[in-house]
Image: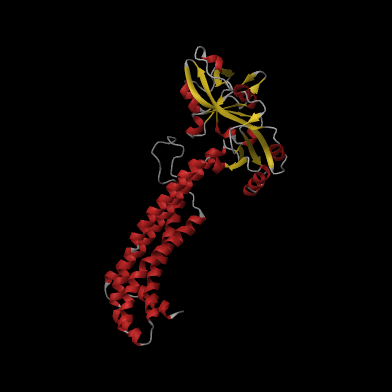
Amino acid sequence: MSFPYYIARRYLFSKKSHTAINIISGISVCGVAIATAALICILSVFNGFEDMVARLFTAFDPELKIVPTEGKYMAADSRELQQIRGDEHIAVYTEVIEDNALLMINNRQVMATIKGVEDNFTDLVDIEDILYGDGIFQLHVDVLDYGVAGVGILQQLGLSNGFPDPIKVFAPRKGERIDLTDPRDSFTEEELYSPNVCFMVKQGKYDAHYVITSIDFARRLFERKGYLTAVELRLQKGSDLGAVKKSIQQQLGNNYQVLDRYEQQESTFKIMKIEKLISYIFLTFILLIACFNIIGSLTMLMIEKKQDALTLRNLGATHSQISQIFMLEGRMISLMGAIAGILIGLALCLIQQHYGVIRFGSQEGAYIIDSYPVSVHIWDLVLIFFTVIAVGFLSVWYPVKSFTSKFADKD
């Protein structure tokens, strides 16, 4: 045990002549602990929301999605895509055409995104988890094309999930100008029937804008035979997503982009990460303010132990050793606060996870979830621990250096 550490530990835990120093030291530990616990709880709630949104998108977004780097459409029979189709790591390969169209029924109309997919779409994503109604998910039967609409679109059109009459779908003809004398001649018109189900992702981006149908219907509507806007992939179980994504990107080259689920929803997750970062910065400032208590307790301790420091100096203690004594005491206060705060924060997160103490409202089912979601990430704990230690160590550096420099000046 080093000499400065031994003295610092004695100073920290021994009784002081002034009770206020003990009280302020205790307040310092509590302040750091509360700020640390707050950091853990707030960041874990952001993680919970991020994980919740990712789970909602899982039922609609594929594991990997291939899109063209430039433009909107790409040839379905391109050599690069045909090579990918036979990759041993790919379990499901689905061609997709996605574009905007006008829906009209019963004198109501709404703009929507038509997503034409292949029949193996049910193997690609967990679409069954978000379906509502008495029917089944199907895209076509004989000459009839079905459209599985988001619940928000049906609400705008004043329909239920089992609308009896077909929805008329209009899309501008390829390469034609709109004839103002008879605009309908400038549009391709098709009809979609109801399979008596709708979907609800609980995200307005999809529920209020998307209609899923067959890719053949989409190709007729948008006059894009032999083309597609994306290829959606599901990997074999146990495949390394990052490694497969990198391999596919290398095979495709620069003309294509391979996107994972987070990149497909980049704007959503980027906003959440920015909010999390801003919360982290603000709470770090609060932590810095809490560390002022450490400065106060150290200052009072150094004033009380001034005579002891002079005695140690006369006995041969160096200027550096005296500085280390008080520096170590401040660091021990920070360390105790950090450990206590992490334990408190983890306990609070565990309670929220199991019991949902903090809720959105008293009415069950009024929101997507009833209580605030919490997800503790190990790297957040590491970041918070080192942040607390760094802020605590830096906060004691100047007052200790200022105090011990007086001894150096007397030499």
Colour scheme shown: secondary structure
Q: Is residue 257 left or right of residue 209?
A: right
Toward the bottom, the furthest residue is: 315
Q: Name the residue rendered at 50%, 27% in the picture.
A: 151
Residue 28 point in image, percent of width and height: 34, 64
Q: Is residue 26 left or right of residue 263?
A: left
Residue 172 point in image, percent of width and height: 55, 21
* Residue 382 vertical placement versus 176 (above, below): below
Q: Is residue 307 at least partly visible in the picture? A: yes
Q: Quadrant of the C terminus?
A: bottom left
Residue 397 point in image, percent of width and height: 37, 70
Q: Is residue 118 at least partly visible in the picture? A: no
Q: Name the residue rendered at 42%, 61% in the picture.
A: 388
Q: Name the residue rendered at 36%, 74% in the picture.
A: 326
* Residue 164 vertical placement versus 85 (above, below): above
Which of 92/369 is in front? Answer: 92
Which quadrant holds residue 61?
Answer: top right
* Figure label count: 0
Toward the top, the furthest residue is: 181
Q: Name the residue rendered at 56%, 14% in the picture.
A: 185
* Residue 151 vertical placement versus 92 (above, below): above
Residue 193 point in image, percent of width and height: 58, 19
* Residue 279 vertical placement versus 400 (above, below): above
Which of 194/265 is in front? Answer: 265
